């Protein structure tokens, strides 16, 4: 599969950041509540989400931005939790030591212009189920877990390539199986996996086949 990416170079003082903004994801929404993180995706967006997370796993020197807040469609009969807030996602390797507080300025300086290109992945690029078990993930000294912070209406997820690739495989499986199952179909990232920091809430990604335009006020 292929995803479109716009590359931006942003300099703040002595630091230069490479931002990879992922296109597509037309039918994808992300909300956070007080207790968990929720994403809704159709089949295409689930596959694109998987590719974006695998891109983050393979791009340790980049900030991978998924702009999800302002969407013209939402799932049919969607019941939003209260309270909730629409969010973008920003994925990055923890070795960058990127402060979430800088994201608002980096995003503003990136603007809309940038170098566009296409990234292609094969099914074989995603881990298989038996490859997703990470030795040592439940040990106290394990340092590859995903951590969460937030800034400028964006959830900032920072970790190693391992949890990004592991989650990408789950999202790709959701794209494969969601359309062929009845009822509630989802993938979940939770601290019990050993790959999320225990301070991070559960992330629930739900497949929704039917979408409708968002009503406009007035």
Image (cartoon, helix red, strand yellow):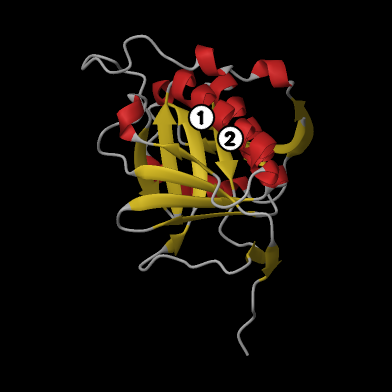
Q: Is residue 70 above or below residue 48?
A: below
Quadrant, the N terminus: top right
Q: Which residue position is annotated with label 2? A: 171
Label 1 near label 2: C-beta < 8 Å?
yes
- Residue at the top extreme? 135
Between 100 and 196, the one nearer to me in the picture:
196
Residue 175, how many percent across, how many down? 66, 38
x 37%, y 25%: residue? 195
x 58%, y 53%: residue? 68
Between 62 and 136, the one nearer to me in the picture:
136
Neighbour tally class for label 1: few under 14, some 14-19, many 20 plus, Cα within 10 Å: many
Where on the picture, by quarter, is residue 114?
top right
Quadrant, the C terminus: bottom right
On screen, residue 59 versus residue 147, left or right, reads: right
Residue 200, how many percent across, how many down? 31, 40
- Number of numbered labels in the structure image: 2
- Residue at the left extreme? 140
Q: Is residue 117 visible?
A: yes
Q: Which residue position is annotated with label 1? A: 167
Marks 2/1: CA distance? 6 Å
Residue 77, how many percent across, how many down? 58, 69
Between 199 and 158, the one nearer to me in the picture:
199
């Amino acid at each position: 599969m292929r995803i479109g990416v716009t590359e931006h170079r942003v300099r703040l003082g002595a630091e230069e950041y490479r931002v990879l903004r992922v296109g597509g994801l037309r039918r994808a929404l992300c909300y956070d509540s007080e207790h968990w993180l929720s994403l809704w995706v159709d089949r295409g967006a689930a596959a694109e989400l998987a590719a974006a997370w695998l891109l983050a796993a393979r791009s340790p020197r980049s900030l991978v931005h998924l702009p999800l807040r302002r969407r013209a469609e939402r799932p049919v009969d969607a019941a939003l939790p209260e309270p909730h807030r629409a969010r973008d996602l920003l994925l990055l390797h923890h070795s960058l030591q990127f402060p979430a507080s800088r994201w608002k300025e980096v995003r503003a300086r990136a603007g809309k212009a940038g170098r566009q290109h296409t990234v292609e992945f094969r099914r074989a690029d995603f881990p298989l189920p038996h490859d997703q078990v990470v030795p040592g993930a439940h040990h106290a000294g394990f340092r590859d877990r995903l951590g969460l912070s937030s800034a400028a209406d964006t959830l900032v997820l920072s970790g190693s390539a391992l949890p990004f690739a592991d989650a990408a495989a789950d999202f790709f499986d959701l794209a494969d199986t969601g359309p062929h199952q009845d009822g509630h179909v989802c993938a979940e990232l939770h601290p019990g996996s050993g790959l999320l920091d225990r301070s991070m809430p559960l992330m629930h990604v739900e497949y929704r086949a039917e979408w409708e335009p968002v009503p406009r006020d007035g």
